[in-house]
Amino acid sequence: MKQGAPSATAGWVAAMRGLAPLLPREARLCDDPYGARFGGELAVRLRRAASRRPALAPLFSIAVGPVRRTMLWMQLRTRALDEIVLDFARASGRQLLLLGAGYDARAWRFSRELEGCRVFEVDHPATQARKRRLLERMGAPPAPVSFVPFDFEAMPLVELPARLASLGHDPGARTLTLWEGVTPYLTARAVGATLGAVRALSAPGSLLAFTYVDRELLERPRGAEAAIRRLVARVGEPYRFGLAPAEVAGFLSERSFRLVKDESHRALAGRLLPPSFTRDLRAARDESRHVALARIL
Ligand SMILES: C[S@@+](CC[C@H](N)C(=O)[O-])C[C@H]1O[C@@H](n2cnc3c(N)ncnc32)[C@H](O)[C@@H]1O
């Protein structure tokens, strides 16, 4: 990330989530009323316009053509992780840890469902400071969130469990850790050290839900993928880490996690979207982004 600057990609993905009203109704799998505010003025205006004139949604959908696929990806990945969070809360899970939380608004979006659950948000200090400023400015209601400014590349991850414990995290109780949209931006060393920290702070029965990109995509980006790579690199957040889907179970088990499920965006589209959208999301690059769930052994 750029020295001292908040993550640009965090703003982009939040905006994509917040622009759900621009998608046809059947493709709206979740809504994030806070997302556009973190994304900037243009996102706020677009959301407002689409919400006021829902009949025009198909037109907006055409207007956002170039980023429509990314918007659908965000719907899929957010919904997949929402399901995991809500299942955990229903099963009396009481600790939710967001690593690289960015502008994740689950603590606010699910304030009712997460009642009695502590939320810990760990993120790069600059991104987190901007989030807290904007939450205050938009008058977001108070939520049971403990904020931990932390740089995964520059700070010792072995210290993270103690930092969390000092804020009330109980390593003896189950934790659901979400690591959404973060692994591609980290070095392999930081990914390994983060998994070590999650292992150390997680009681048996705890879960880790994370997203990753197929290493193949990093090694041989083509067409639109090459353009995305150039764009993220230009804002100081280059893709650095990927995994081969066939190796994920082994990679995790070497680190004391058991893979429970792993779904590509294409598989998620097949499960969550009507067939007309499935046809839109059957390119190789839809198979290259994954949402995985692992259990701590
Ligand atoms: C694409 S955003 C995803 C944000 C959020 N999880 C979401 O899905 O909306 C990437 C996040 O990783 C965080 N991040 C990247 N490198 C980091 C680092 N070295 N230390 C801490 N956080 C980092 C950024 O601050 C940002 O919040």
Image (cartoon, rainbow, N blue to C red):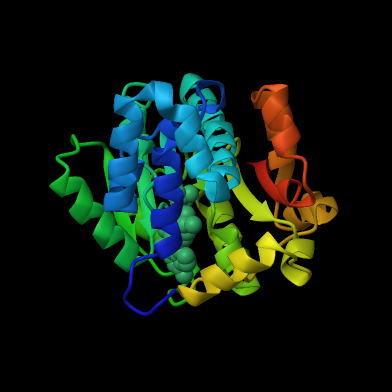
- 129 sits left or right of 179 in the view: left
Can you see residue 293? yes
Q: Position of residue 209 (x, y in %)?
A: 59, 43
Q: Quadrant of residue 183?
A: bottom right
Q: Residue at x 33, y 62 (%)?
A: 127
Q: Position of residue 128 (x, y in %)?
A: 31, 59
Q: Quadrant of residue 215?
A: bottom right
Q: Position of residue 199 (x, y in %)?
A: 58, 53
Where ligand 1 lies, by image quadrant? bottom left
Q: Position of residue 24 (x, y in %)?
A: 52, 26
* Rendered view: 63 above or below 6: above
Instruction: Quarter of the image for the N terminus: give it.
Output: bottom left
Can you see residue 176? no
- 247 sits left or right of 259 in the view: right
Q: Residue at x 54, y 49 (%)?
A: 67
Count up the numbered dots.
Answer: 0
Q: In this orientation, which residue lies closer to the viewer: 185 or 236?
A: 236
* Rendered view: 155 above or below 116: below
* Residue extending farthest bottom: 3
Instruction: Quarter of the image for the C terminus: give it.
Output: top right
* Rendered view: 88 above or below 250: above
